[in-house]
Image: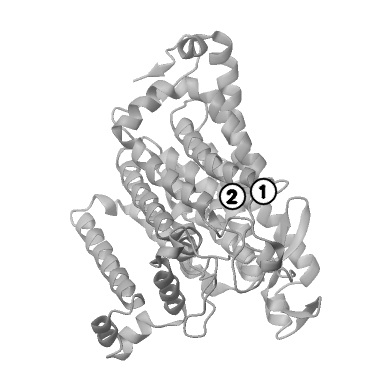
Amino acid sequence: MIEKIVNNATYKYKVVPIAIFLVIELMFLLAFNLGNLGSAYRLFAILLVIVLLPAFLKTLNEDLTNGFIFIFLPLVIFLISMAFSPVFGSHPSELFSPSISLLNRDLFTILMTSVGGIAFLLLGYFISRTKLISKTNFIFFIYSGIALLLFVSLAATLMNYGFFHRIIYGERVNYFEGSAYPVVLQANLLQGFNIETVNYNVLVTMGLLVIVPLFALLFLKELKKPYPLILIAIGSIGLLTIIFLTDFRSLIYLIPALLLALMFKFKVHKMKHFKTSILVAVGLGIFLIFVGILAALEVGFVETVLNSNALTRRIFYNGYTIKYMGIIKEAFDPNFLFGNPYNYSYENILIFPSGNIILDTMKETGIVGVIAFLAVIVIAIKFSVDYINHSSDNVVTKYMVLAFLVTLFTRYMLKYQFNQLSFDQSYWQRNYFPFVESKEFAISLFLIGYMYIAKPRRELNVKKGEEMINE
């Protein structure tokens, strides 16, 4: 049956090319967030996977046995953990309180988030194996969608607040339903077809993402016209956002993307001791995290050592890590295996949201979900290394794919804006934006699927007179 579909001329030469084109359109609309149709976009991704699966089934089966299956296992476990999490479940309205995290997601939303996430991973894989589109073009579409959303949002912000409002308005506040909201924390965001008042960090994050393409100008010789102009246009929107919102400290989150561009430019990753240096740095990071977990679990001798000098106290007992320790401690409670909806205070601090994507994930899906989420990250890093070393993509495409993931992860490790809306008294009912439901998560899965490299690599070619699957 599958072979009959694949060999059908209409399917090969009409359905597949149209579906590939729709995938790129979908990624642009998702990045632009047109209509704020999260579940609808995921449903459309599922339908496109169903349409394209027969064409890619042979190579997909081979790649699953060659290692692609390893990204599916932890991803599925993570998504199942979300489905079983009390944080995502429904609760009686009288339980709503700022002291608990209640997302109230219905079964359809959870199903679309879970299956839709897997669909985006597969769509990225399909795009990597087709010759029907330019590999440079597809990543430009994603960045352009975010830049367009940011352009409209920044224009609305400037119209409503004026230029440099975060400096001009100082300590002024707006009142909404009797509560005061600092003006300096506000900005406007296009949500669907409405302009919403949000925390300005939402715009700053998008600004950082669209500044990233500017570093691709380091590879000017590899860029054909009009790509340099597009890079400058996209990056300028991000720079203007940072300037008008006067959040210059956030530029520090661009350092990893800049280092990545320099690595490609000067081929640092091919130098003799590069791999060893990276492994040493990663090992040190894992050691520090392990020590932090022991401190969170209040292991006596570890606490004594960390409190014995000012440096370790500053590293392990600051405003960020105190929240982290509270969430880690609760995650090991057997009662919260799949997440903890209660925002217990830890040393009189409200620990959720933490502002860290991994710790928020631990709070939402428990120790099971966060281990699976970390496994997805580790496997994605492995895919990235293989992609850098073995992909035939040009250096611009490689950089822009990896820079998106690196910048997003760096930003969300310290500044994940879980509460986005400014004017919302009932924030515990509707003002939670878990990463797993965001467009950034869907785009990230798409890019991870795209990066997968197996040997031998096979690509889909539906040009007339050529084989469907080529070595």
| Relative depth, front residue between 210 and 297 | 297
The quarter of the rendered structure image containing the C terminus is: top left
Residue 311: image x %, image y %?
Answer: 31, 86
Q: Which residue is drawn at 53% across and 46% down?
A: 443
Dot 1 falls on a residue whose secondary structure is: loop
Q: Which residue is drawn at 44% across and 12% down?
A: 466
Q: Which colour scheme is used?
A: one colour
Local crowd at mark 2 within 10 Å, few (<14), some, or many (≥20)? Answer: many
Q: In this view, does 353 lie above or below 445?
A: below
Q: Are marks 2 and 1 in contact (CB under 8 Å)?
A: yes
Q: Which amino acid does label 1 sit on?
A: Asn
Q: Is residue 231 above or below residue 236?
A: above
| Relative depth, front residue between 437 and 246 | 437
Q: In this view, does 320 lie above or below 239?
A: below
Q: Earlier along the polypeptide chain: callout 2 or callout 1?
A: 1
Local crowd at mark 1 within 10 Å, few (<14), some, or many (≥20)? Answer: many
Q: Mark 2 points at which residue?
A: 439
Where on the picture, by quarter, is residue 11? top right
Q: Residue at x 59, y 40 (%)?
A: 27
Could one spot residue 442 in this view of the protein?
yes
Where on the picture, by quarter, is residue 125? top left
- Separation of disc 2 and disc 1 at Cα? 8 Å
Q: Mark 1 points at which residue?
A: 33
Task: Tell whether 68 sits left or right of 342.
Answer: left
Residue 20: image x %, image y %?
Answer: 56, 28
Could one spot residue 229 in this view of the protein?
no
Q: Is residue 424 above or below residue 263?
A: below
Dot 2 falls on a residue whose secondary structure is: helix
